[in-house]
Image (cartoon, rainbow, N blue to C red):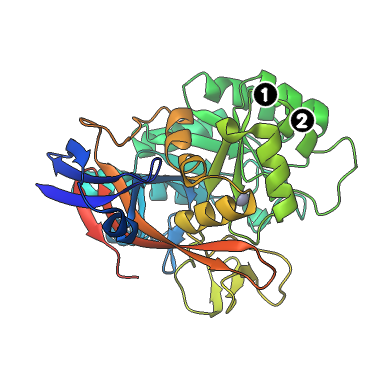
Amino acid sequence: MTTLTARRFDTGEAVRLQIRNGRIASILPAGVSAQESAELPFVGPGLFDIQVNGFHGIWFCSETLTTDDVEKVIRAYSQQGITRCFPTLITTSCGAIEHGLATIRRARENSMLVRNSVVGCHVEGPFISPVDGPRGAHPLQHVRPADVSEFLRWQQAAGGLVKLVTLAPEVANGLDFIEQVAATGVVVSIGHTAASTSIIQQAIERGARLGTHLGNGCAGMVPRHDNVFWPQLADDRLTCSVIADGWHVPATMLNCVHRCKTSDRIILTSDVSGFGGCRPGRYSTGEVAVDVLTDGRIVVAGQTQFLAGSGATTGECVAHFMSTCNTTLQDAWSLASSRPAELMKVAPSSLEEGSPAHLTVFRLQETTEADGRATRRFLPELSVVGGLVERSSV
Ligand SMILES: [Zn+2]
């Protein structure tokens, strides 16, 4: 049995949690003084990130991915407070996607930590816009028209673990793909797209329910009215994910997305790169070269304008969103815990007796900047991943 004493993320109340057999056995007032309570870390339902690409130089879409690699990355995530996730495979050959999915499936069979944490997989691409800009850092040679038979091969390799697919609805067969794949229960998301308003509206009509990292994976210059943003912001059937790392979308846009979609229809994701956690320097996937900069950004090699994934983790995005959109911790935290669980139909974790024990214990270090703004830094302390405890070394 594990016992934790921390402040609830929602009410701030100091509680003592007991965890037994992978569930919260009890949660009671800790009975500590106000001063002692203020010293305690927070505890919230475990962070759940639907878009994570790898870590420490390991990519889930690598042709040479091993089960040990998967476990290493999942352990690193848990040390960053991420208790559940969708490993994400980006545009590559069908064979490499199948290899990645089959390897993740085997890693789940071998490791309880991986099994508890990996509750689905996300395939982002390869059915995306070939155009520079919307395509982002996805390699052009592997971009191809939408193909349901290829999706079925992925699901076979994954043992049905693919729960989320991102595609550009304007690619050949894109709208039919959305309808057929959504009918299997998989969430289909719009992303890396240059679609018109009309195509986005048809995509939602045919079953798309998510917009992947709104504000990224799109053209740098767009028509002022007929573009990918307005139809995604305007339709309440669509939830949008945003990369709230402080680099991928400006504060003004984050605030507008929050006001349009409200906290009911936003998911925070890190989209952490396979080069997350790496020291500054130049790295290559074999197909794409990137620079990890000293300020934490990861960019296409040789320049500093075009980002190539994020170096931030989910908790850092929550802290940034909270400061930028002036929300409560409860509100911001739910966008990276209960909200993704609801959309992906994964059992939610909550601070209640009997709930599956997926918990993140963390501190928020608050700083007042020279211009008077309050900023917060996320400091993970410990994760409980389906009852398994992982301490943070950071
Ligand atoms: Zn992307």
Provide residue 359's location: percent of width, then percent of height.
30, 46
**How far apart in space, not on screen, are marks 2 and 1 (Cα)?**
9 Å
Q: Which residue is mark 1?
A: 204
Q: Which of the pair 342/201 is nearer the observer?
A: 342
* SS of the residue under disc 1: helix
Residue appearing at x 39%, y 38% in the figure: 120
Q: Which residue is mark 2?
A: 231
Q: Are marks 2 and 1 in contact (CB under 8 Å)?
A: yes
* SS of the residue under disc 2: helix
- Mark 2 or 1, closer to the camera: 2
Residue type, label 2: Pro
Q: Within 10 Å of the Cα at label 1, are there few (<14), some (14-19), or many (20+) other Cα atoms?
A: many
Residue type, label 1: Ile
> As drawn, is 383 to the left or to the right of 17?
right
Work out whether residue 320 can be spotted: yes
Work out whether residue 169 can be spotted: no
- Which image quarter is the C terminus in? bottom left
